[in-house]
Image (tube, rainbow, N blue to C red):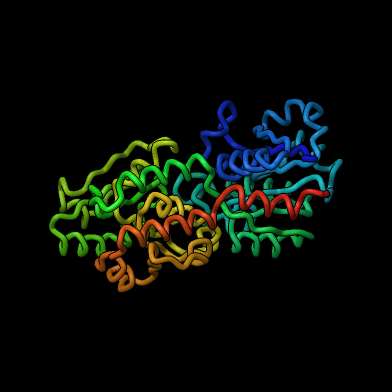
């Protein structure tokens, strides 16, 4: 017999939490996968939860995604301090005040170090009520262990739900063996990665010079480096963010997704979804090997740190046959299957 599990997300998308990518991956995807296993699940924003805590008190388990201390949630957590019933979930390194200067809020969005530190401290204050944690990456789990020393720390990767998997498979079947419109693609979810693109722009420029027919797609808010502007119409920049349900089709126009990322304590804890979202639709990926990408070994993935590695990784073509590409895409999808990971979650957290 299943149990009841409430996912509570500290999201700014109060009316439509599903629009928040973090909430979608960390709450909706596991909640629906656990529901398919016979459990009663629901997702709610932390703000709505705080409005009427008593209304939800009968759930067996509470998963608080990115919990932030407030008067409303503080009283609830205090009543269940270190209980088996409450689980904290983080997918970003957002609870260590000493590293406030590394966060995008401070570095790119103009927040003061005081306000940023206050935000992190409220997350840390909430986290101290928990003895069970789920984290999206191994480096993030290590950080939680060092900071809070809880009894149970589990890594549950971001996962692909059946909807994404099905769309990706249809796209692979439709594009099998056919040339894609763009050789390279860069997908900027936010305007905080301009330096990342600039760092690999010289290598990208050389790769495009070596292949006169190549084109590149830049999607989302990004500043195009001068090295790439020289290619004129061979580089297409679509600045609007694409809704998640349209992302697979757009990504499938690209042969190789480029995913550079500077390395520090914050970025090392990031998810490797840039790789497996792309691999699922048959893209190869050249990426910085942060921890959650480095765990994959794949013929669809090249890991690059130095300028020389980026130059080699971008200029050397991927030469997989259609059969090899399909086999590898299917293999990667299985590793991040939502139902598989829900089974692991159930085994480790649900009392039978």
Question: Hey, which quadrant is residue 62 in on the image?
Answer: top right
Identify the residue at horizontal 59%, vertical 37% (top origin): 11
Identify the residue at horizontal 16%, vertical 61% (top origin): 211
Vertical placement of residue 135 versus 67, above or below: below
Query: In the displayed image of the protein, which residue is found farthest to the left?
Result: 212
In the picture, the quarter occupied by the N terminus is top right
Q: Position of residue 299 (x, y in %)?
A: 39, 66
Query: In the displayed image of the protein, which residue is found farthest to the front?
Result: 323
**162 vs 27, nearest the viewer:** 162
In this image, 191 relative to 69: left or right? Answer: left
Identify the residue at horizontal 69%, vertical 58% (top origin): 154
Vertical placement of residue 88 versus 149, above or below: above
**105 vs 147, nearest the viewer:** 147
**32 vs 53, nearest the viewer:** 32
Q: Position of residue 319 (x, y in %)?
A: 28, 65
In this image, 83 relative to 233: left or right? Answer: right
Q: Position of residue 34 (x, y in %)?
A: 67, 42
Vertical placement of residue 228 versus 233, above or below: below
Identify the residue at horizontal 13%, vertical 58% (top origin): 212
Count of number-bearing discs: 0
Question: Hey, which quadrant is residue 279 in on the image?
Answer: bottom left
Vertical placement of residue 152 versus 316, above or below: above
Q: Position of residue 189 (x, y in %)?
A: 42, 45
In this image, 24 relative to 135: left or right? Answer: left
């Amino acid at each position: 017999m299943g149990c009841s599990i409430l996912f509570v997300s500290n999201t700014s998308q109060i009316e439509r939490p599903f629009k928040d990518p973090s909430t979608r991956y960390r709450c909706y995807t596991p909640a629906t996968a656990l529901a398919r296993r016979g459990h009663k699940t629901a997702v709610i924003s932390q703000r709505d939860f705080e409005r009427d805590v008593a209304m939800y008190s009968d759930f067996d388990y509470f998963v608080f995604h990115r919990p932030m201390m407030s008067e409303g949630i503080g009283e609830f957590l205090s009543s269940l301090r270190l209980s088996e019933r409450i689980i904290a979930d983080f997918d970003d390194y957002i609870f260590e005040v000493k590293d406030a200067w590394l966060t995008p809020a401070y570095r790119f969005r103009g927040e003061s170090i005081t306000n940023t530190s206050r935000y992190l401290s409220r997350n840390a204050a909430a986290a101290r009520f928990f003895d069970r944690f789920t984290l999206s990456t191994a480096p993030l789990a290590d950080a939680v262990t060092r900071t809070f020393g809880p009894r149970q720390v589990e890594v549950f990767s971001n996962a692909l739900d059946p909807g994404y998997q099905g769309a990706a498979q249809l796209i692979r079947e439709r594009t099998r063996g056919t040339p894609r419109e763009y050789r390279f693609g860069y997908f900027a979810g936010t305007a905080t990665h301009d330096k990342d693109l600039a760092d690999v722009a010289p290598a990208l420029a050389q790769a495009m010079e070596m292949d006169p027919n190549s084109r590149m797609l830049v999607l989302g808010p990004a500043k195009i480096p001068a090295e790439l502007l020289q290619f004129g119409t061979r580089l297409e920049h679509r600045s609007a963010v694409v809704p998640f349900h349209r992302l697979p089709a757009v990504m499938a126009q690209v042969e190789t997704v480029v995913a550079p990322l500077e390395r520090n304590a914050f970025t090392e804890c990031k998810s490797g979804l840039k790789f497996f979202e792309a691999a699922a639709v048959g893209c190869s990926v050249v990426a910085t090997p942060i921890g959650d990408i480095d765990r994959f070994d794949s013929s669809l993935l090249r890991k690059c740190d130095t300028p020389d590695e980026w130059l080699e990784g971008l200029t050397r073509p991927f030469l997989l046959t259609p059969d090899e590409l399909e086999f590898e895409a299917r293999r990667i999808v299985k590793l991040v299957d939502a139902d598989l990971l829900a089974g692991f979650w159930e085994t480790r957290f649900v009392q039978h």
